[in-house]
Amino acid sequence: MSKISQRFKTAIGGFLRWTTNVKPEKMGSSWFMPITGETSTFKSIENLKAYLEIPELSTIVNLKAKAHGNIRLSVLNRETMQPAKNYQNNIKIIRDPNWFQTFSELWRQSSIFREIDGNEYFYLDYPYGFSPLSSKALYTLPGWMMKCHTPDKRPFFMQSAPNIIYEFKWGRDKYVLPKENIIHLNDNRIEIETNNWVTGQSWMTFNAAPINNIREAYQARGFMIENRGAMGILANVGKDVAGVAPLGEDEKRDLREQLAQYGRRRKEVPWIITGLPLEWKQISIDNPANLGLFEEVKEDRITLCHAAGVPPELLPGENGATYENQKWAERRLYENTIIPEDLERIEALNSALDTASRGWIIVGSYEHLNVFQENRKERGDAIARLMNGLKIALDSGAISAIEIQQELAKFGIVAPTK
């Protein structure tokens, strides 16, 4: 076991070990959030293998993860939407989630786990009987090390408070995790089974064809490079009165020796001269491009981009990609994919921490990114026009100060009147 694995096992062992002895029947409500099926460990491992071996796939997944990592979380007053004060030390876990990760690292890694496995597991570290607000750490757990099942055999729609059992596999050990400490998010739920309708399936599972096509293309190109085999045939075209005159054994041996030696010495001429009437016939494809392998990889890469919600223009080396369309592609990535996915995560955090019963709420923002700076300028121009129009209306007596405040509240400039 590596040092980092040993340190990680030691760190989590303390707060996981008690669960093997303490098994309360009910500890409150679960933070399981069924967003949209069932995936086996085998499929997760296959997806992980594809992620590790196919650069086109890992590039897409990592691009999304880096985009997710750019989020900035903050805690705002629920009424004014201004930075809140005195709210449990600013919620430590969104500033310093655990002993070995920054929040951006945690967010990126959790995104990768979900892309590969179709499930996302956050573990809130707080003692039994305490509130989630007392959490000292937040971890993300890989789905292929988790097992989820429900002992109740009734259909899921007949269970109002299902007993979902979460097990974390660490080597040969298994740790039962209290479901109240788990925030479970998942993707597509298609292959529902009687004992597992809890877990989701990765989009990779539904795109096995393009993933395998890319793998096969790489294998074909590698095989051609490593094992070219016979490139062609030197055929005798000389004839005598009896027809084609075959080469003698001595003549064939002499040609083989000359061809075998060619290219091994510097300044060697690239020709072999013989008095025999010979003709070269190509029998192999010496250029992988002639097989259409590069085009196949490109088409499958675009298919995977669409499945993952990533504009193809953002991938390195994409033909026809300009600065302008890359800029708008990046904006589409955030607006159509990254922000909706992160809103789901933030909703889950707010639910787990029960912010609905408090005066503050966790929110996320990407407005600090350059891609959204034009939005801020447009907003500033719109507010300036609004302020000018409201001033004219106020001076003419068309509206009151209260009505101005109400209009400004729509833009989040001032607190709304009660």
Image (cartoon, rainbow, N blue to C red):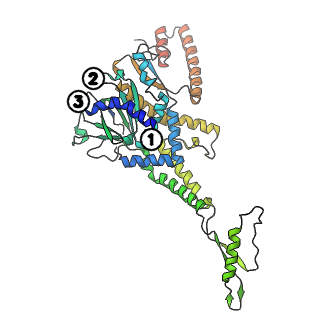
What residue lies at 56% left-to-right and 51% top-to-bottom?
A: 298
| Residue on which disc 1 sits | 115
Specify the label residue 24 is tagged with.
3
Front-most of 85 and 95?
95
Q: Which residue is mark 2?
A: 129
In percent of width and height, residue 131 lies at 32, 21
Horizontally, residue 173 falls left or right of residue 117, namely left
Q: Nearer the viewer, residue 277 or 203?
A: 277
Q: Position of residue 242 (x, y in %)?
A: 68, 91
Q: Is residue 334 visible?
A: no
Label pair 1/3, CB-CB below 8 angstroms: no
Image quadrant assignment for residue 76: top left
Residue at left offset 67%, top offset 79% = 252
Image quadrant occupied by the N terminus:
top left
Which amino acid, mark 1?
Glu
Sequence-earlier tag: 1 or 2: 1
Which amino acid is tagged 2? Answer: Gly
**Which residue is at the front of the view, 392 or 136?**
136
Q: Amino acid at mark 3?
A: Pro
The vertical placement of 194 against 395, above or below, is: below
Q: Secondary structure at mark 2?
A: loop
Using a 10 Å C-alpha cutoff, classify the residue at mark 1 as few (fewer than 14 neighbours), some (14 to 19) or many (20 or more).
many
Question: If the image is split into quadrants, where does the C terminus sit?
Answer: top left
- SS of the residue under disc 3: loop
